[in-house]
Image (tube, rainbow, N blue to C red):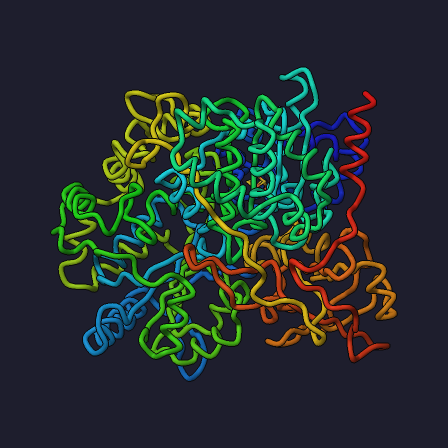
Amino acid sequence: MITKLKDFLGLDIKTDKYKKSDDALFGKVSNFKKPDEWVRSTCGYCGVGCGLYIGVKDGRPVYTKGDPTHPVSQGTLCPKGLTEHEMVDSTNRITTPMIRKDGKLQATEWDETFSTVSQQFKEIQAKHGKGAVACISTGQLLTEDFYTLGKFVQLGLESNNYDGNTTLCMASAVMGYKQTFGSDGPPASYEDFSHADVIMLIGANIADNHPILKLHIAKNKKITGKKPTIIVVDPRHSKTANMADIFVPLAPRSDLALMNGLCYIILEQGWEDEKFIAERTSGYLAFKKHIMSNYPPQEVSHITGIEVKELYELAKVYAKADKALSAWTMGVNQSSIGTDTVSAICNLALITGNLGKEGAAPFSITGQCNAMGTREFGFTSSIPGYRNFASGTDRAIFADIINVPTELIPTQRGYAYPQIIDAIDRGEIKALWIVATNPLVSFPDQNKLRRALKKLDILVVQDAFMSETAELADVIFSAATWSEKEGTYTNSERRCNYAKKAVEPLGKTMSDANIVIEFSKYFEGKHELLFKDLKSSRDIFEEMKRVSAERLCDYSGMSYELIEELGGIQWPCNTEYPQGKKRLYTEGFKCNTQDGRAKLLAVDWKPLAESCNPSFPLTLNTGRTVEQWHTRTKTKTISLLNDLAPEAWVEMNPKDADKLEVKSGDRITIGSSRGEVKNIIVKVTEVVREGDAFVPFHFSEQLINSVIIADFDPKSFEPNFKQCAINIYSQAHPEGIEQKVKISGELSYQSIQTTTKYIKEKEES
Ligand code: SF4
């Protein structure tokens, strides 16, 4: 039976490894249903963008298997992708619109929800101004959904207080690319992992968060004839660090200083690429002066905890590579200096000529399945098609394309996500429409958030799944989810993938785009103005093509059929690049800056906003695990995933565990100046260093974001999720840990010998 099941699912069953994983992967065989048809689509979880087939039986999804022809995933899927069909009909689904009556959410009809909400939105806007209604959306939507929603909020409701949960995950990458290249847009392809001589992963635990990318690294040796040197820069020895040839266990959030320090050594040693700098960059002299004046290796060693000798060896390995690829995710982005850290990574790539060629780029890996699509067609930090709110020309051209008065286009960005919460708390925003995101678990400033939400006149939640936030809603718009609607997702490498509709929406649910279009009919003239020609996702896609034509994120050469045929298309796609383009900023491909060159920017490391202190002497790092997705609204009812990761845990170094007299399996409390989280299970491990702790953020039952600091990047508004001062309280030591206070920039970390060992081995070989 198992063999048949594996054959049927198209998986390799020849190895024992697969045989052993059968039960874990597919659970109860008696539940197996043979699909009537397979529908080719794209995974709706993360930014890798794996291709898959959805098995459909009796009109519902019953299996998921990898698409062997898809260029990204080549037939493989991670545990979330393999169980994605279970999410669709889970017990957690919202199947009907709801309104709170007598204190309880009660099922109703669409007309009642739309009438109620539209009436309240109009009254609030008449009394408090257009901006008193705000919206927070998500990178989980299809681009067609997201474009439609943004268009309605900005041009229908005429409120520019609109942002996405993407501000919590990749806004720093957007702003960093903008300040360096003049535009957002990751310049690389996943296949660059297969061509690079050196791969430097900075704050990127891809083994947990983007596991399928390892496929592309694994192919490198076969393609290049030699194994690439993998450098992992991370305070925590994550699963990804197990792949490293060089592990750089730097002090928390000292990555910007490390990048600047490497630039110093490269410039000092004359290892820079003079030709590339002269022909393709601007600002070199001022940049060099800044680096040479402020980031000598001794200083950088002091900040990062990495020995000077190791800094030199690291700089040499990177600078001497023909092709160096730097990739990062949340460890870099989720920082109050995230934007500048992104530019520092770009600086390092630019002075060594690692841009616009196979295997060489500064590459931001996105979190959500469609974080990139929201960047291209945002209506949040920019006008769709990477246009600028402040540019009269951009506004006029955009208005002309979609046939609305130019005056309707906002002249500036409204509040970003954390600013929206602030404005609610101040009483300025009275109505909030939250779409497919769950701030009651994911937002860092939980005290303020909960206080603010209580002040709203109306909270509308649009989602396919019940969540902690939806439970507070006054009105719920019930949404269709992955497999129930048609559209596109763009992955981290700018690949626009086709997500096909496989089944009808469950119960009384509608696609997010249809909800918006139907809702717009309750606002006089808005439907006719904005949506009268948009009758299907294909119509919306055609408008997106017109909006993006001749822009960097050009979709004009795409069609759903071509995307499906090619297994996704990397923008720009137009007459010049009819099948898309693998890399940006190749020879002759200009940046969106005045002189067409990339900018070398002087950016500075800053100490943590909250240093450790006698009351809170430990540094908390938060992150993810491969088995769960975000706040678990989609994964908490999937038994396989929950069996693998049923609750949060805290990783503690054995020395800290000794001080608290705890062992793995014991339960402790974590506290900061903002609150406490009780009943967290202990994992004693050397993965984290003495004085550090790590907790995954997914679990509302152990709400770790209630202790996180509310500190944001002033350019991207991204929260500093990764470092704050905490204490841990055990039964034997209810007073917590007392230890020598560790202050960022003043502590000399004991260097882990991985780097030295690697260098020695290299020298010997
Ligand atoms: S790696 Fe990401 S896109 Fe691929 S199957 Fe897993 S969750 Fe889906």
Would you say residue 497 is visible in this rendering? no
Q: Residue 344: horizontal and vertical position, in percent?
A: 51, 43
Image-quarter location of ligand 1: top right
Q: Quadrant of residue 515?
A: bottom left
Q: Residue 303: horizontal and vertical position, in percent?
A: 65, 53
* Residue extending furthest toward the bottom: 102
* Residue 634 position (above or below residue 173): below
Rendered residue at 72%/69% (across/down): 617
Q: Residue 419: horizontal and vertical position, in percent?
A: 39, 67
* Residue 440 position (above or below residue 652): below
Horizontal relation, residue 18 to residue 565: left or right: right
Horizontal relation, residue 673 to residue 399: left or right: right
* Residue 304 position (above or below residue 578): below
Q: Nearer the viewer, residue 348 or 95?
A: 348
Rendered residue at 52%/33% (across/down): 349
Q: Quadrant of residue 643?
A: bottom right
For the image, the number of numbered tags is 0
User: In which quadrant is the N terminus drawn?
Assistant: top right
Would you say residue 606 is visible in this rendering? yes
Rendered residue at 69%/32% (across/down): 6
* Residue 33 position (above or below residue 510): above
Q: Nearer the viewer, residue 63 or 490?
A: 490
User: In which quadrant is the C terminus drawn?
Assistant: top right
